[in-house]
Image (cartoon, helix red, strand yellow):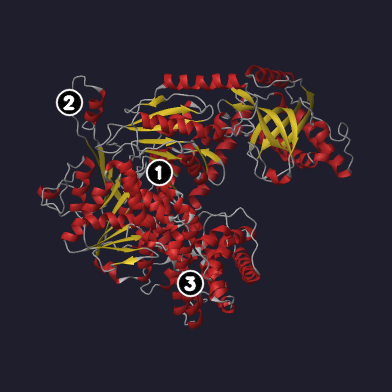
């Protein structure tokens, strides 16, 4: 790769055993572990880099080996990817290890720690979540003695040689220029794929940019498809080699079964060699057909309209009971049953009341562990229902694990699960993150999840992460995944999910005020915001794509030059006429489609033209008009829901691409090419999307469920289009619809006049003329060239620069910096706050809002800044909280307006809504004043665990506010924040982690 800042060397390391004669299945699976344990090793090297390592001991950059004395030995034989990783580490070079959860990445991290201990250096281990940091601290403390922990709410042995911390803490240390970093040789970034997290991904990116080049990095990641690109970025950024060791080898192979809901039996769809069993899938689909026939399928077009029957969950309970019972009978436990809803997890676990998986002896051990765990709680908290209800469940070997549980119960469940005392664990996907806690079997109760916008199928990356929990290394010959599906799922959808490739790591870099202020206030000045933008992974990915765009532009320019341009003026004139007609028609249709004018014409069988933005759906046939409450129109799962929202939906038969409206996905129009196959589906269309009404009507069959009935309509529409080559006759708004507004009549006349000109144009007769096609293609090519060129010009760098300029303007307007960009008192306070909205909270500190409140009110008001679960209940606040909340809203509104005036894209109402979360104000206020936990959980429908998580983040936030007040010399405020923090820190809310 000449000319690039990095060159790439690639090598595939394989270990193959020769073919063996037939062996029994169990044994053959065990033997498979010796076959094709391949790992790919690549290295990105800066141009002109020369290695000074002794090749006899270290090998070469592209073929690293290590023949020296090891910093750590293992009781097992290392896999090839672990061997290669150790060799890279001993070369003292950065490395990205990308492998499945159970493959053994931890062994690589432990080796880096052992090297640092051997060489009397310090090492930092970062993890994305506090809970994971606690678990990692426990795990590493058992292996190495000198380990410390730093999360937002706990600090243990901060002078230890190996420090476990959250990535946010590392970023804070880098911003403050912490002395600790001068002694650090290695930083291990666990779960680096968190970089694509929309909210927090930027923390990883900034930490990597700020790390001094002398520090080497170890990145541990789930499998990702662009590991090489990431390594090239590191190489480019720190001018040092970065190795990639990638393996998708699974130590324990997986078998994937499907269980049809409401049906019976399991169907093997993917075997341990990753072969898809098409015949089994077709048998499985037959069971649905039989079920549907038995039930009499009444929901004709439910799928096309996106209104899917809600029968799944009801039968789901008994199905899950059946599956769990079967798993236990076949000795496939332990099993993790994944649900995407916390309430569902609990309901499923409670529905197992008749099952018991533990022996009397195991029950006693569970009770003993349980009692020891809750010793740290006071007597009152031990009798909370959330704690008392758990013991009988745990004794039967059944447990629940999700983010809403009390932390102590969640950790207890993890510990019991690791000890084999929990046989059936009902969990949400958070259990698949981080620590390696595998089971023999994994069950998916659903393959769809709500992601905040829509119900969608889980992606292959998510499936890989969760299914990776199946199969315990050294214990199981194979892991088993059981997928429950409750509707006809397309074969390719299932195939893509189970056998799909891992997703690429895409940067979510953004500029925060916290980062900008910290960069401005850094003394040495070597890093400024421009430096961070230019060195971001985001910018690197963008620039990497540029050569490809340039190549594409050259190809298009060649094509444009070859296209014949004769008669161009004539064609341009013809096209202009068409465009003018389209513009006038659009203007006219927005007036015609007002309900009072159009509804009486939208009778079943009427032909209507549908256009959605730039997408032309062509002519469709009205089936039905439904009136919906306007509140519901915003949440329509409609295929063509217009953002303008209208209170009428026109169910229209439209020509859709084959398979595009299967499995509840969004239908796509069938392109109007000759020979293009498509199918008719009923699609819900909102009034503003109708772009034409025809005079013609068709008679439609009473039952549109059979495909033949819908296809007959398609043939009829196509026949009409042949009969009217100049276009179907449209309803005349004046003559046929009786609309007599003078400007409307004028518009209709104008369109008629233009249409007459169009028809008499010489090119109109020769619609298929080579000349027209040529010209249109040329116009398309030129348009594409312009777009690509503007993409190249409109560098991301420039976009970020503009944003930086606008954000700096906001900081000046609010008094955080002066005209020369020097950080002022207010800015010095904001520099220390990264848990909540730094602009908004400093505004309250400086405008006196906090001065008028006592420390209980301060705690309650500060809780509005912490992201967390929303309550569905109406919030009724006491007077002493309602007023400060109102002040907070006013400040938020003012800040949003200033941002908008400074040319930032901010929606004022959305900003206020997103910045202020008052759902637990009352709870925090009462807790701060001394209420018991049992009392405060009665005040809200939010899960106990979510309340505790918020309280702990709130404590961290209050401590940041205390530091900010101290930095600007506000002693009274500092004392108030300290008292607010102190009033929270008691009881179960701040009970110690069982891992510590």
Q: CA distance from mark 2 to mark 3?
A: 68 Å
**Looking at the figure, which quarter contains the C terminus?**
bottom left
- Residue 542 placed where, x, y %? 43, 50
Residue at x-position 45% and y-position 28%: 259
- Residue 268 placed where, x, y %? 39, 25
**Looking at the figure, which quarter contains the N terminus?**
top left
Q: Secondary structure at mark 1?
A: loop
- Residue 185 placed where, x, y %? 24, 61
Q: Secondary structure at mark 2?
A: loop
The dot on residue 983 is 3
- The label nearer to you, 1 versus 3, is 3
Earlier along the polypeptide chain: callout 2 or callout 3? 2
Residue receiving disc 1: 504
* Label 1, residues with CA under 10 Å away: few <14, some 14-19, many ≥20: some
| Residue 575 relative to residue 249: left or right | right
Earlier along the polypeptide chain: callout 1 or callout 3? 1
Q: How many marks?
A: 3
Q: CA distance from mark 1 to mark 3?
A: 45 Å
- Residue 339 placed where, x, y %? 47, 41
The dot on residue 298 is none
| Residue 467 relative to residue 649: left or right | left
Instruction: Using the rendered image of the protein, determine whether residue 793 is visible from the camera's viewpoint.
Output: yes
Q: Are marks 1 and 2 in contact (CB under 8 Å)?
A: no
**Residue 515, placed above or below residue 294:** below
The dot on residue 18 is 2
Towards the viewer: 869 or 617: 869
* Label 2, residues with CA under 10 Å away: few <14, some 14-19, many ≥20: few
Towards the viewer: 761 or 100: 100
């Amino acid at each position: 790769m000449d000319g690039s800042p990095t060159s790439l060397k690639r090598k595939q390391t394989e270990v193959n055993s020769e073919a063996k004669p037939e062996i029994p299945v169990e044994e053959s699976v065990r033997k498979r572990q010796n076959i094709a344990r391949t790992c790919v090793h690549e290295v990105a090297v800066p141009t002109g880099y020369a290695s000074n390592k002794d090749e006899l001991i270290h090998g070469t950059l592209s073929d690293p080996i290590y023949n020296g004395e090891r910093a750590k030995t293992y009781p097992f034989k290392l896999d090839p990817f672990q061997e290669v990783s150790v060799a890279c580490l001993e070369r003292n070079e950065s490395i990205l290890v990308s492998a499945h959860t159970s493959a053994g990445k931890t062994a690589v991290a432990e080796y880096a720690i052992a090297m640092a201990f051997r060489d009397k250096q310090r090492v930092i281990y970062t993890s994305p979540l506090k809970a994971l940091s606690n678990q990692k601290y426990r795990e590493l403390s058992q292996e190495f003695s000198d380990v410390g922990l730093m999360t937002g709410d706990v600090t243990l042995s901060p002078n230890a040689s190996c420090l476990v911390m959250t990535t946010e803490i590392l970023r804070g240390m880098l911003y403050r220029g912490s002395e600790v970093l001068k002694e650090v040789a290695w930083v291990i970034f666990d779960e680096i794929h968190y970089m694509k997290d929309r909210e927090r991904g930027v923390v990883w990116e900034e930490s990597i940019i700020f790390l001094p080049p002398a520090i080497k990095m170890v990145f541990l990641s789930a499998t990702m498809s662009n590991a090489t690109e990431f390594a090239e970025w590191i190489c480019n950024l720190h001018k040092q080699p970065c190795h990639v060791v990638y393996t998708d080898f699974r130590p324990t192979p997986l078998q994937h079964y499907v269980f049809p809901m409401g049906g019976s039996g399991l169907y093997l769809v993917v075997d341990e060699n990753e072969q898809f069993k098409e015949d089994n899938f077709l048998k499985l689909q037959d069971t649905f057909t039989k079920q549907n026939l038995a039930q009499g399928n009444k929901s004709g077009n439910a799928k096309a309209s996106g209104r899917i029957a809600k029968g799944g969950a009801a039968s789901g309970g008994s199905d899950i009971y059946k599956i769990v019972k079967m798993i236990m009978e076949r000795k496939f436990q332990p099993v993790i049953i994944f649900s995407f809803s916390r309430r569902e997890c609990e309901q499923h676990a409670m529905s197992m009341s008749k099952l018991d998986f533990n022996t009397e002896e195991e029950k006693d051990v569970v009770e003993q562990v349980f009692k020891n765990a809750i010793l740290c709680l006071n007597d009152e908290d031990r009798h909370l229902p959330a704690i008392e209800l758990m013991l009988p469940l745990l004794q039967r070997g059944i447990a629940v694990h999700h983010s809403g549980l009390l932390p102590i119960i969640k950790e207890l469940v993890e510990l019991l699960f690791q000890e084999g005392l929990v046989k059936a664990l009902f969990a949400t996907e958070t259990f698949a993150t981080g620590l390696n806690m595998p089971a023999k079997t994994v069950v998916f109760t659903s393959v769809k999840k709500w992601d905040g916008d829509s119900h969608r199928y889980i992606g292959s990356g998510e499936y890989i992460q969760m299914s990776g929990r199946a199969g315990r290394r050294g214990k199981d010959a194979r892991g088993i995944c059981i997928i429950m599906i409750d509707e006809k799922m397309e074969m390719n959808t299932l195939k893509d999910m189970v056998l799909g490739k891992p997703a690429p790591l895409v940067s979510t870099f953004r500029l925060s005020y916290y980062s900008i202020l910290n960069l401005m206030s850094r003394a040495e000045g070597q890093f400024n915001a421009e430096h961070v933008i230019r060195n971001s992974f985001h910018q690197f990915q963008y620039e990497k794509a540029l050569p490809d765009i340039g190549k594409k532009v050259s190809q298009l320019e060649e094509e444009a030059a070859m296209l014949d341009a004769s008669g161009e003026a004539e064609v341009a004139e013809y096209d202009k006429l068409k465009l003018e007609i389209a513009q006038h028609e659009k203007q006219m249709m927005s007036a015609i489609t007002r309900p009072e004018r159009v509804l009486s014409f939208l009778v079943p069988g009427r032909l209507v033209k549908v256009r959605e933005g730039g997408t032309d759906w062509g002519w469709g046939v009205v089936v039905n008009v439904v009136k919906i409450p306007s509140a519901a129109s915003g949440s329509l799962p409609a295929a063509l829901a217009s953002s303008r929202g209208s209170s009428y939906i026109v169910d229209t038969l439209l020509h859709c691409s084959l398979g595009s409206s299967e499995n509840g996905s969004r239908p796509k129009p069938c392109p109007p090419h000759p020979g293009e196959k498509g199918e008719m589906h009923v699609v819900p269309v909102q009034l503003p999307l109708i772009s034409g009404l025809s005079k013609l009507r068709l008679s439609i069959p009473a039952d549109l469920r059979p495909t033949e009935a819908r296809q007959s309509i398609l043939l009829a529409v196509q026949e009409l289009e042949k009969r009217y080559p100049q276009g179907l006759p449209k309803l005349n708004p004046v003559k046929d619809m009786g609309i007599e507004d003078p400007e409307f009549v004028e518009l209709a006349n104008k369109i008629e006049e233009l249409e007459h000109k169009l028809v008499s144009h010489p090119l109109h007769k020769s619609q298929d003329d080579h000349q027209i096609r040529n010209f249109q293609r040329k116009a398309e090519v030129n348009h594409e060239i312009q777009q690509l060129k503007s993409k190249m010009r409109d560098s991301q760098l420039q976009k970020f620069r503009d944003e930086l300029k606008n954000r700096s303007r906001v900081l000046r307007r609010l008094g955080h910096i002066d005209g020369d960009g020097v950080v002022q008192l207010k800015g010095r306070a904001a520099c220390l706050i990264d848990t909540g909205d730094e602009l908004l909270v400093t505004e309250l500190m400086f405008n006196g809002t906090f001065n008028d409140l006592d420390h209980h009110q301060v705690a309650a008001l500060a809780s509005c800044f912490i992201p967390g679960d929303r309550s569905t209940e109406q919030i009724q606040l006491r007077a002493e909280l309602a007023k400060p909340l109102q002040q907070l809203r006013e400040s938020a509104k003012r800040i949003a307006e200033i941002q908008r005036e400074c040319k930032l894209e901010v929606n004022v109402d959305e900003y206020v809504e997103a910045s202020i979360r008052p759902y637990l104000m009352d709870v925090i206020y009462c807790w701060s004043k001394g209420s018991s936990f049992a009392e405060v959980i009665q005040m809200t429908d939010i899960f106990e665990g979510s309340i505790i998580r918020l309280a702990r983040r709130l404590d961290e936030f209050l401590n940041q506010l205390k530091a900010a007040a101290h930095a600007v010399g506000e002693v009274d405020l500092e004392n108030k924040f300290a008292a607010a923090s102190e009033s929270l820190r008691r009881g179960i809310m701040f009970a110690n982690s069982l891992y510590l």
